[in-house]
Image (cartoon, rainbow, N blue to C red):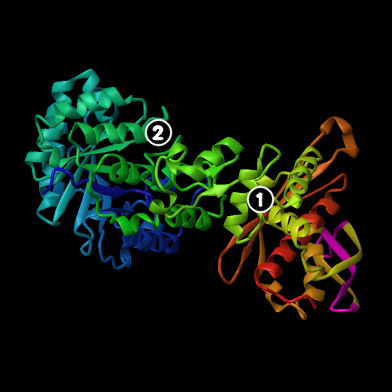
Amino acid sequence: MSDKRVYIYDSTLRDGAQTQGVDFSSADKVAIARELDRLGVDYIEGGWPGANPTDDAFFSAPPHLGRARLSAFGMTRRAGRSAANDPGLQAVLVPSIKVVTLVGKTWDFQVEVALGVDLEENLRMIGESVGHARSRVDEVMFDAEHFFDGFRANPDYALSCVRTAYESGARWVVLCDTNGGSLPHEVEDVVGQVCKVVPGSHVGVHCHNDSDNAVANSLAAVRAGARQVQGTLNGLGERCGNANLISIIPNLMLKMGFETGVSANDLTKLTHMSRMLDERLNRAPDRNAPYVGESAFAHKGGLHVSAVEKDPRCYEHVAPELVGNRRHIVVSDQSGKSNILARFRDIGLDVDPSDPKLNQLIEEVKVREFNGYAYDGAEASFELLARRVLEGVPEFFRLTSFRVIDERRWNARNELITLSEATIKAEVNGQHLMAVAEGNGPVSALDAALRKVLTPVYPQVAELRLVDYKVRILNPQAGSGAATRVMIESADGHGGDRWSTVGVSTNVIDASYNALHDSITYKLLRDNAAER
């Protein structure tokens, strides 16, 4: 085995499921496992058989994996039982699963207080459990729980625990920073000492992020000789989360020169992988996430943009394409001409830098942002503004008027309900039309009414989905007369593309309509719909 080979172990399906607000179904776990397999991780921890119905359902029909090995998680035998006669240990030995990960105590304090056994009995529990599992499966891993705390308290005993597991047949002994309190220099020192007892080619690390050092600690462990890293997608996990594999993998490959099961081509799927998980969890991706966030390669200051145009290395530590991301030139009231021109190139708009309309556009952006607009998070609205100033945008429809009514009442079942009803009058394709629709809120009702009149003329509007809606009060000191900014994120149900639009008004419904109008217009313009 090459000393430059590091094995990636993903525990999203178990550790990630312990995240507050995360509840994977068996179907979720199957879908995520298949995506992880495509990415090229070496091991996928499926969960804990016998612990809950979801994990039981998952292991009863595990997904077929082409590259990764599926692991079942469990714990060493209980005190007073033999390994062959422990129900918990037997439940982990699923016939179709050939890799098992067993967790055991390595901190003398926890052995004597939490388990209530003497130190020698704990060593027997570790050795017998690993040995029994190894007789039933191809590969056994030992997760040394609280190892770094145990090493600080009693290094000889902590080392004897991992040595026992290794000598009993464990392919990997994994050093766990269970409470996430260690620092990189401590991890590197301790792992270096472990690698003198157990070969580094058999040592792994499992870090939690309670001190915001899980990624750094994992990389420090690899520097010290460990050759397996455990973690989760997007750093999911209880409390502050686990080590984030989305950051660890590119750091290992692009920064440290290590090999993983993830190829250079696989690495370009990283951004998709991160966002796929957020989509499945129905939560917004972290815009500032390293490597894969929408803002990871975003440039807002004019001087920065000028420098990036000359040499991206000035403000980009890697090329965004390597991880499946893209450079993002942000337009705002801090923008100069270089930002605007760079953004034009991204959207395919050919503009002469000497065009006087360009300065007009820059001033328009600054005035609008002073009045509450924010184009650094609403690129679709900026593109429409730019095209209106520079070349014009077709008026696909004109809303003559709208009225929204909210009703809160008790229904026939004695349930308290709130309904919104929108009535609109619009001109589409030379026809004056009126529509009425209900929704679960005023914006939903307005959107439904618009679709009624637009879809017969522009069928592609049916593909449009509103996936996020944010409201911000810009000047709360003005009380009920405060200006409101609405940001709408939309998605194309057919292609999966997303875009954001913005609207500002002292009336929240009017601001919502402005953002909604931009969203629909952007969809029609992008789809090259002819003006009717």
Q: Distance from label 1 to label 2 (Cα)?
A: 48 Å
The residue to which callout 1 is attached is 353
Q: Residue furthest top?
A: 153
Q: Which comes before the other along the chain, label 1 or label 2?
A: 2
Q: Is residue 383 above or below residue 428?
A: above
Q: Is residue 306 left or right of residue 26?
A: right
Amino acid type, residue under disc 2 in the picture? Asn
Q: What segment carries the magenta color?
A: 407-431
Q: Residue at x 87, y 44 (%)?
A: 506
Q: Residue at x 49, y 54 (%)?
A: 275
Q: Secondary structure at mark 1?
A: loop
Q: Nearer the viewer, residue 90 or 143?
A: 143
Q: Quadrant of the C terminus?
A: bottom right
Mark number, residue 13: none
Q: Is residue 43 left or right of residue 169?
A: right
Amino acid type, residue under disc 1 in the picture? Pro
| Residue 440 visible in the displayed image | no
